[in-house]
Image: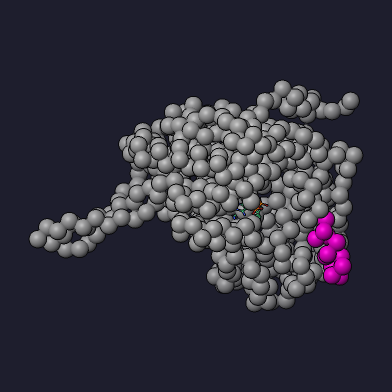
Amino acid sequence: MNAKPETVSWHERARSLSFRTQAFIEGRYVDAASGATFDSINPATGKLLARVAAGDTEDINRAVSSARAVFRRGSWANLPPAKRKRLLFRFAELIGKHSDELALLETLDMGKPISDSLKVDVPGAVRCINWYAEAVDKIYDEVAPTGPGALATITREPLGVVGAIVPWNFPLLMAAWKIAPILAAGNSLVLKPSEKSPLTALKVAELAVEAGIPAGVLNVVPGFGQTAGKALALHMDVDCVAFTGSTATGKTIMQYAGQSNLKRVSLECGGKSPNIIMADYPDLEKAATAAAYAIFFNQGEVCSAGSRLLLQEGIKDAVLEKVQAIARTMQPGDPLDPNTHLGAIVDETQMKRVLGYIDAGRADGAHIRFGGRRVREDSGGFFVEPTVFEDVRPSMAIAREEIFGPVLSAITFKTPEEAVEIANDVIYGLASAVWTRDVTTAHRVARAIRAGTVYINCYDADDITVPFGGFKQSGIGRDKSLHALEKYTELKTTWLDLS
Ligand code: NAD
């Protein structure tokens, strides 16, 4: 065995790792009421990792009751903000202390490289919770300018019980983007992680209680979308569902809200984000490097991935050669090897979906410039090469639909106007980028693109201070920044007659 020493060490740690597999309700781990479980598979080996409680309506009902009871008691919602802040700081600190364990769980459960789990996912979750903790005692309410005959205050109150439903691509980070502002605003929460990656959320739940956050404030019920997710979104005593996932499921969640109690819905959905490089951009190597990471990072399983590369005529070969050079350094590898930059696809179903789109691209007449195959099949895991299609027409499925894998569709255009037209000609509007040295072109294009984020001369720049979310069918509402708190609070006007 010539495994690198650090690789061996992560494998060894994996062998002695224990998993939290029960639901976490009212501060305790419990089996599903039915006793049912589902299998959590390691996507790098195809082997069973753990059997996880399959929550359903009864479990959701218990979790919602526990969340409602603690909200009514006010033992979280009515805490002085400075106290809530301290407990959230402590929660973030404990997550930080369990970094290695959480990173390992994330990588085993979801297939992403351990170096990414360690450098991106866990620290991102810690930063997010700390940031909202800091905000808790710095937000003031308002007094309306009604004149001397009245005192009208406009205050923000927590909603009550929030249900959060999250996907599998950044299981811990997407959960943190919900947990932090929801709890900071004083709500109680029932979190339903994806059935494909429930393990980090289940571990984090006990850290909340260890930090001193009252039992029942953060409940986690694992299970399938059609059962646990549906029960949560249809629940008559849930005030809001904060959803991150596909656009198709987002539409269903809105229907559930309408069929039940008209609960608030916020949706962070899919994307097919355009990354536009103008021929005048002086550093094509930099733009191409960013384009490669924009699609290959996290195996392309990123909602804001730059999955459409729009190249102005004349620069296609220069850019794609560099993208290919980066892709060579990102061949799929063992996720537990710290030198791996591209891990396993989350499961067999998703891998087949990605390979299906590769077949569809070929059948539609696009050309594979490189990649296109399943690899490392002997491992039993689900790995797909970084893949680039050229000669893609905007009408093709690979240019219009979210693949959610390491597959880039390169499209050429002549003018900035044509680039904007292509960029906007999909149902999504999550992220986008334009690369140009011309400041006027940059701003014109940025204004014309219908997307929640437009990067200029960069891609995937990130900070918790800026809102993240989509136009069009990429969603409703924003995660991150102070704006996220708007989703989890009600505005109340209190009018005192002084006349
Ligand atoms: P998905 O829609 O299949 O599942 C998301 C979550 O919804 C899971 O927890 C699932 O169990 C649950 N769910 C499924 N059906 C349900 C139902 N009928 N009722 C209630 N819950 C249900 O999405 P996915 O495959 O897990 O994640 C990938 C998608 O997430 C991609 O489209 C990606 O773009 C999107 N995403 C968006 C963002 C963002 O911030 N905009 C971030 C990450 C991922």
Q: Residue at point 72% right, 64% down?
A: 401
Query: Residue at 77% of width from left, 27% of height from top?
Result: 11
Foreground of the two, 460 or 316: 460
Q: Is residue 105 visible?
A: yes
Q: In this image, 285 relative to 61: left or right?
A: right
Please state the extent of the stretch shown in magenta in the rendering.
355-367
Q: What residue lies at 57% left-to-right and 31% top-to-bottom?
A: 30
Residue 389 screen position, x and y as percent:
82, 62
Name the residue nearer the viewer: 158 or 455: 158
Side (left or right) of 280 relative to 179: right
Instruction: Locate the N terminus by quadrant.
Output: top right
Q: Position of residue 476 (x, y in %)?
A: 52, 61
From this view, report whether residue 426 is shown above or below residue 248: below
Q: Residue furthest front?
A: 34
Instruction: From the top left corner, tell me how far across and down residue 457 is, in percent.
Output: 63, 59
Q: Does the segment drawn in magenta span residue 239?
A: no
Q: Position of 457 compared to 149: left or right?
A: right
Which residue is drawn at the image coordinates 66% and 29% (left, top)? 19
* Picture quarter with the C terminus: bottom left
Residue 450, above or below 229: below
Residue 269, image quadrant: bottom right
Judge whether 486 appears above or below 221 on screen: below
Q: Residue furthest left?
A: 499
Query: In terms of depth relative to the viewer, which is nearer, 281 or 71?
Result: 71
Compared with 212, 109 (above or below) is: below
Chief SS of the magenta region: helix
